[in-house]
Image (cartoon, rainbow, N blue to C red):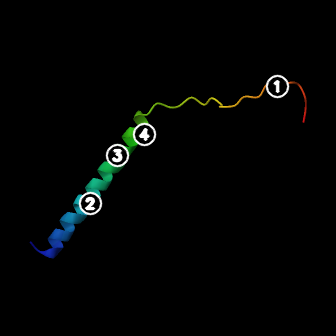
Amino acid sequence: MSRLLAATLTMVAAAALAVGAALGIVALLEATPEQPNTPLITYENTGQER
C-alpha cells in the first residue's frame, strides 16, 4: 500500500471519528434535561433602601 493511500485513509478515518464524536456530544447535551434556574440564596425584602 502506498504511503499516499495510507495517509488518505488515515485522514478519512480521523475525520469520520471526529464527526462521530461531535455528533455524540451534541446528542448527549440535548438529552440532558434543563436545570431549573432557582437561586441558592434568597434575601428577604425588609423594605429598607441601600
Looking at marks 3 and 1 on the same chain, the residue that comes earlier in the sequence is marked by 3
Residue beneath label 4, please? 29
Q: Amino acid at mark 4?
A: Leu
Residue 9 point in image, percent of width and height: 18, 64
Q: Amino acid at mark 1?
A: Asn
**Residue 32: which disc?**
none
Which residue occupies 90% across, 28% down?
Answer: 48
Residue beneath label 2, please? 14
**With respect to residue 40, does 21 lie above or below?**
below
What's the CA distance linking mark 2 and mark 4?
23 Å
Looking at marks 3 and 2 on the same chain, the residue that comes earlier in the sequence is marked by 2
Looking at marks 2 and 4 on the same chain, the residue that comes earlier in the sequence is marked by 2
Q: Residue lying at the far left in this picture: please name it.
A: 1
What's the CA distance linking mark 3 and mark 2?
14 Å
Residue beneath label 1, please? 45
Q: Amino acid at mark 3?
A: Leu
Looking at marks 4 and 1 on the same chain, the residue that comes earlier in the sequence is marked by 4
Q: Quadrant of the C terminus?
A: top right
Contact between marks 4 and 3 (CB within 8 A): the answer is no
Residue beneath label 3, please? 23
Count neighbours of disc 2 (C-alpha within 10 A) and say few if under 14, some if 14 to 19, many if 20 or more.
few
Q: Amino acid at mark 2?
A: Ala
